[in-house]
Image (cartoon, rainbow, N blue to C red):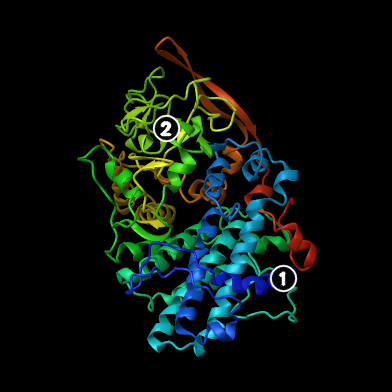
C-alpha cells in the first residue's frame, strides 16, 4: 500500500487531463472538457477557480473505471461480471472470468479485476482528499465550495462502496492526504467500521446536494443519487453473506462481515429504499402500447429519463453496439448469455417454462417469451439492422454459419447466443444512429426490487412487497403481471431474486454481486453450464442443448476477491482474504 499511495501522489497531476462527456456548462463547454495544464502543481491549480473545478471534474471522468473495474479502460469489464456468473460466458480463453469460473487459483489469485479495483478506487479516494485539502483556499464562492465538497465526499464514499463489496473491510484513510514520509502500513478496518464510515459520509451530504441539477451540471450526483447508493449499500450489508451466514472465523471474520445477525438491518435497507420512493421524483419508463415491454427497451437507449437516478456519463458513440453485437453487425461480441439464463425467462403470461400452462414449446423455444428476453438476448435468426440494406435481417448463429456461426473462433458465440442489452435497434457497431446513453449505476427498478426484498425479509410478503414487484412486471409487458396471492416469505424471496436476474441481466454487475451477497453462488456455479447449438438443414433449424464448460466455485474463498498480492507483500498488516 505504501508503494501504491506513492504512485497515487506522483500520478495525481495526470488526473487533470479531463475525460470528455456530454455535460454542459453555461458557456456550452463540457464540464469535463480538457485543459492544457502542463506541469501545474496543487498550489497553481487551486489558485485558479476554473482549474479547481476541473480537478474535481477529472475524478468524474474516471468514474467509468468503477463500472468496468476488470481492466479500468475498456468496455470488456462490463461483461466480465456477467461472464463470472451463471448468466454468461466470455468468448476469450483467458482473463478474470475464466480463472474465476474454474477456480483456477493461478489465474484468479492476483487477477486484473482485484488489482484494478484496489488501484483505481484508492486513486480516486486520494484525489478527492487532495481536492478537499485545497478547496478552502480556492477562489470560489462559499456556496459553490459547499456543494463541491459534498459532491467529492459522495464520490469518495462511492469508491469505498466498491471496495467493500469486493474485498470486505479495507483501510480507511479519512481526509488525510498522505505524504511520501508518512507511514502507510495500516491495517484493514472491520466490515462494521467501513460500513459505518460510508453510511455516515452519505448521510452528511444528503441535505446539501440538490434534488435536481441545472442542465449544465447534468451528471453530478443529486440527493436522490446519494439515497439510492445508500439503499444499495444497506441492502448488501443486510444480506446473508455479511449478516446471516458470515462463513468466516478468526480475526478475518469481523473484516468480512458482521459478528452476529441483526434482522433490523433489513428494516434499515427497506427504509433507505422507501426514502427514494417517497421523493416522488422517479418512476419506471413504461410503454406497452408501442410493443409489449417497449418501455424496458426505450429506457435502456435514453440518456436521461424518469427512471435513471445516477449514471456515469459517456461521450456519444456506439459503445454497447460495438462490444455486444456480432461481426456481421459491426460488433466484437465480448460475451455470450447462457442457456441457464435463457431458460429462466418466463413466458409472456408470466409462467416459468417448466410450469403447467406456460405454453412453452422446446422446438420453438423463443416464441411468446417475457418481452425483456427479446431486448436482452440475440438468438439464432433474431432480426437486427443490416448495414447494407438498412433493413432488419436474421442474425445467423447456427453452427458454422458464415461470419457469426457458433464456434470458438473470434467474433463467434460459444453458447449460441449474444447480448444486445442497451443496444439501439437502429445501429450496428460502426453504422446507424449514434447513442447518447451513459452507464447506469442506479435506476428506479433497482429501488423497487431492493425495497421489496428488504421488506419481505423483515416482515414477509405484504401488500407493499407485491406492489413493488408487480410494478416491475407490469412495465415488462407480462400479461397477467400479477403474482399469485398468499405467497410465503420464502416463495416471495425466490420471485424477487428471479425478477432481479431478468430485469438486470448484463447490467452493472447486479447478478455477480447478488449471488455473492445471497451466498448462493456455490449452488449456481458448480457444474455444467449450457448453451444451444443450432444446425441448419436446407431451410430448417434443429436445436440441441450443449454443455460448453464445467465450472467450480470454492466457498468461502470465492465470495471475496483477493487483496492484490503486491499490496499484501508490502504491508504486513493487511490480512489476506481466506483461501488466497
Neighbour tally class for label 1: few under 14, some 14-19, many 20 plus, Cα within 10 Å: some
The answer to whether residue 501 is visible is no
Disc with the residue nearer the chain's start (2 vs 1): 1
Quadrant of res 7: bottom right
Quadrant of res 271: bottom left
Residue holding disc 1: 187
Determine whether, in the image, residue 24 is placed left or right of residue 102: left
Q: Position of residue 416 (x, y in %)?
A: 50, 27
Looking at the rendered structure, the secondary structure element under dot 1 is loop
Residue at (49% x, 60% y) in the render: 263
The quadrant the N terminus occupies is: bottom right
Determine whether, in the image, residue 290 is placed left or right of residue 130: left
Q: How many marks?
A: 2
Q: Position of residue 194 (x, y in %)?
A: 59, 69
Residue at (41% x, 19% y) in the render: 362
Q: Position of residue 370 (x, y in %)?
A: 34, 34
Determine whether, in the image, residue 190 is placed left or right of residue 444: right
Q: Position of residue 211 (x, y in %)?
A: 32, 71
Q: Which mark is residue 378?
A: 2
The answer to whether residue 197 is visible is yes
Residue at the extreme left of the image, as rendered: 289
Between residue 67 and residue 303, name the one nearer to us. Answer: 303
Q: Nearer the viewer, mark 2 or mark 1?
A: 2
Quadrant of res 575: bottom right
Neighbour tally class for label 2: few under 14, some 14-19, many 20 plus, Cα within 10 Å: many
Between residue 527 and residue 287, name the one nearer to us. Answer: 287
Residue at (32% x, 61% y) in the render: 277
Amino acid at each position: 500500500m505504501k508503494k501504491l499511495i506513492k504512485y497515487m501522489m506522483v500520478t495525481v497531476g495526470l488526473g487533470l487531463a479531463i475525460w470528455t462527456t456530454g455535460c454542459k456548462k453555461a458557456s456550452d463547454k463540457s464540464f469535463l472538457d480538457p485543459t492544457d495544464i502542463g506541469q501545474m502543481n496543487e498550489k497553481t491549480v487551486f489558485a485558479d477557480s476554473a482549474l479547481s473545478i476541473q480537478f474535481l471534474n477529472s475524478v468524474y471522468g474516471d468514474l467509468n473505471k468503477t463500472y468496468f473495474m476488470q481492466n479500468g479502460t475498456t468496455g470488456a469489464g462490463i461483461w466480465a461480471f456477467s461472464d463470472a456468473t451463471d448468466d454468461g460466458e466470455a468468448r476469450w480463453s483467458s482473463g478474470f472470468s475464466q480463472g474465476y469460473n474454474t477456480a483456477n487459483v493461478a489465474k484468479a489469485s492476483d487477477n486484473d479485476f482485484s488489482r484494478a479495483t484496489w488501484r483505481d478506487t484508492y486513486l480516486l479516494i486520494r484525489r478527492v482528499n487532495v481536492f478537499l485539502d485545497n478547496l478552502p483556499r480556492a477562489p470560489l464562492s462559499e456556496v459553490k465550495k459547499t456543494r463541491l465538497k459534498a459532491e467529492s465526499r459522495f464520490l469518495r464514499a462511492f469508491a469505498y462502496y466498491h471496495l467493500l463489496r469486493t474485498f470486505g473491510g479495507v483501510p480507511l484513510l479519512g481526509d488525510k492526504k498522505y505524504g511520501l514520509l508518512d507511514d502507510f502500513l495500516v491495517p484493514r478496518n472491520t466490515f462494521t467500521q467501513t460500513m459505518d464510515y460510508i453510511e455516515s459520509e452519505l448521510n452528511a451530504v444528503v441535505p446539501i446536494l440538490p434534488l435536481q441539477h441545472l442542465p449544465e451540471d447534468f451528471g453530478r450526483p443529486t440527493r436522490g443519487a446519494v439515497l439510492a447508493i445508500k439503499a444499495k449499500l444497506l441492502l448488501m450489508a443486510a444480506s446473508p453473506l455479511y449478516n446471516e451466514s458470515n462463513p468466516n472465523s478468526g480475526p478475518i471474520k469481523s473484516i468480512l462481515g458482521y459478528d452476529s445477525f441483526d434482522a433490523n438491518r433489513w428494516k434499515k435497507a427497506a427504509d433507505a429504499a422507501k426514502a427514494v420512493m417517497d421523493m416522488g421524483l422517479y418512476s419506471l419508463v413504461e410503454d406497452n402500447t408501442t410493443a409489449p415491454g417497449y418501455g424496458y427497451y426505450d429506457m435502456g437507449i435514453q440518456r436521461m429519463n424518469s427512471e435513471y437516478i445516477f449514471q456515469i456519463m459517456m461521450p456519444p458513440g456506439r459503445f454497447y453496439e460495438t462490444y455486444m453485437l456480432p461481426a456481421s453487425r459491426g460488433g466484437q461480441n465480448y460475451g455470450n448469455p447462457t442457456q441457464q439464463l435463457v431458460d429462466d425467462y418466463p413466458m409472456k403470461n408470466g409462467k416459468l417454462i417448466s410450469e403447467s400452462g406456460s405454453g412453452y414449446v422446446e422446438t420453438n423455444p423463443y416464441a411468446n417469451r417475457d418481452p425483456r428476453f427479446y431486448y436482452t438476448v440475440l438468438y439464432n435468426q433474431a432480426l437486427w439492422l443490416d448495414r447494407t440494406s438498412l433493413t432488419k435481417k436474421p442474425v445467423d448463429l447456427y453452427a458454422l454459419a458464415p461470419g457469426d456461426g457458433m464456434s470458438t473462433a473470434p467474433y463467434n458465440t460459444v453458447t449460441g447466443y449474444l447480448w444486445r442489452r442497451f443496444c439501439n435497434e437502429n445501429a450496428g457497431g460502426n453504422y446507424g444512429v449514434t447513442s447518447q446513453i451513459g452507464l447506469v449505476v442506479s435506476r428506479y427498478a433497482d429501488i423497487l426490487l431492493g425495497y421489496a426484498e428488504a421488506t419481505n425479509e423483515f416482515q414477509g410478503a405484504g401488500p407493499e412487497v407485491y406492489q413493488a414487484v408487480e410494478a416491475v412486471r407490469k412495465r415488462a409487458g407480462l400479461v397477467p403481471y400479477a403474482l399469485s396471492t398468499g405467497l410465503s416469505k420464502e416463495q416471495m424471496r425466490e420471485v424477487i431474486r428471479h425478477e432481479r436476474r431478468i430485469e438486470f441481466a448484463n447490467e452493472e454487475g447486479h447478478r455477480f454481486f447478488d449471488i455473492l451477497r445471497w451466498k448462493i453462488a456455490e449452488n449456481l456455479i458448480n457444474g455444467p453450464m449450457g448453451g444451444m447449438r443450432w444446425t441448419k438443414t436446407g431451410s430448417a433449424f434443429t436445436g440441441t442443448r450443449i454443455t460448453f464448460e464445467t465450472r467450480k466455485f470454492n466457498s468461502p474463498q470465492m465470495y471475496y476477491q483477493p487483496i492484490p498480492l503486491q499490496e499484501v507483500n508490502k504491508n504486513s498488516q493487511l490480512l489476506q482474504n481466506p483461501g488466497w
